[in-house]
Amino acid sequence: MDTTDKYEVLDMSLAAQGKNNLELAELNMGALLEVRKRFVKEKPLKGVKIGLALHVTKETGILVRTLIAGGADVAITGCNPLSTQNDVAAALAEEGVKVWAYKGETNEDYYRYLNNVIKFGPQITIDDGCDLVSEIHKNYPQMIKDIICGCEETTTGIIRLKAMENDKALKYPMIAVNDNKTKHLVDNFYGTGQSTIDGITRATNLLYAGKTVVVCGYGSCGRGVAQRARGLGSNVIVTECDRFRALQAAYDGFRVMPMAEAASLGHLFCSVTGNKHVISFEHMKKMKNGAIMANSGHFDIEIELSTLAEKASSVRSVRPSMEEYVLDGKKLFVLGEGRLINLAAAEGHPSEVMSTSFCGQALACEYGVKNRDSMKPEVIQLPESLDDEIAGLQLTAMGLSIDTMTPEQSRYLNSWEEGT
Ligand code: ADE
């Protein structure tokens, strides 16, 4: 480990590779670079301390550079023990960023690093999964008076924040960046769809055509995974608890059934729900020999791994990101220790995807600073105009332009008199 008082990363000699990856990421993050260009001129985050607990990837590196360009002082740690790109962490440390992260972190290091970010004294927190916010509320309540707001990146984090809000436990304003329309479309649907398949493929080299793939959950992420698996020729089954989403899956042409029935049919299972034990030990007992389980939700609780580990007659690693459990004489495989497979076994969402998500984060920080006196300690939605701005930035980055309504058309949409 390479350590100073400003960073702890695996190996500083990886910094040159990290720099190359950051350079490549920038090429595909045109929308975020536009925000950065404006931030350089306007410095909307001047003097603001921002603490991040995000996946430390090349894309997050470009967000860090954007916040710094806007005048912020930044400290960062990871938000999952397996998602850090060690080369990027080293490159950021070399650039002078306060960074504590390495791939394969122990639980102890994970929390020590979160605490380093908290001790830095952030006035804005950026979280992916709500661990930073939760740790501040539990162990550092005295710091909350100095916090302007927090920004949350993912659905799991929003679920936790809403639970805090309902319990009246949430003590500072939280901007639900995850709930931007652009985030759900580009990141949750297209990003998770592709990067989940990428992670599973890198871990297994599986042929999807002809396989029965069971996707647990049909939110934006589950829809993405189900549609990509179908595109590769799989026979896809969707399981859901939500009646509307189940209906949507059925009308999208997927087989819909309870997990108890799907368990014996699937070759590959992928949970994308944010909930616990969606693939339970009871389900595993029904699975075929050779069945593969992966999770693409934020936390490693979706697959009931603890019981599997307890009951299996043997457990061994058969290749990177793939463990074999022998249960009642059959082999079951778990990918990436049940942690989010797109980052555990691959590189997460492509840079272009994260460009739109991180425009949301950068603009949310600016929004928070501008509106610091009026925001309440609740879960806040960004105004639609900002979401629309992000869509516009991404269209421009893609070299696309669109029509503008004529004055007559605008008038028509705003009137009620004209009918048949
Ligand atoms: N979440 C999913 N993919 C990611 C990536 N490439 N960088 C940061 N966070 C992510």
Image: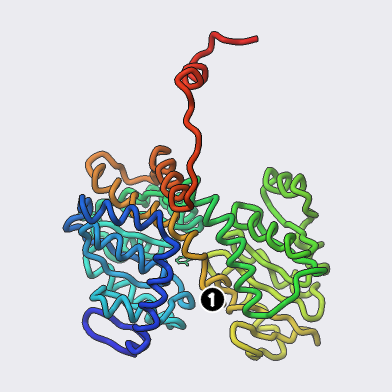
Lateral position of residue 330 relative to residue 49, left or right: right
Amino acid at pointer 1: Ala
Residue 316 figure quarter = bottom right
Where residue 84 appears, as percent x and y from the top left, is 43, 76
State the residue in front, 120 or 391.
391
Q: Is residue 371 left or right of residue 286?
A: left
Residue 121 is drawn in which quadrant?
A: bottom left
Vertical placement of residue 99 versus 140, above or below: below
Q: Is residue 47 visible?
A: yes
Residue at 36 percent across and 45 percent down: it is: 378
Q: Secondary structure at mark 1?
A: helix
The answer to whether 51 appears left or right of 348 in the picture is left
- Between residues 158 and 39, which one lies in front from this camera angle? 39
Give residue 346's position: percent from left, percent from top. 55, 75
Q: Judge the density around disc 1: few (<14), some (14-19), many (≥20) Cα neighbours within 10 Å.
A: many
| Residue at left offset 65%, top offset 85% | 323
Image quadrant in which you'd find residue 63: bottom left
Quadrant where the N terminus is found in the figure: bottom left
Please tell me whether residue 63 is drawn above or below residue 368 in the rendered image.
below
Q: Which residue is mark 1?
A: 344
Q: How is the image coloured?
A: rainbow
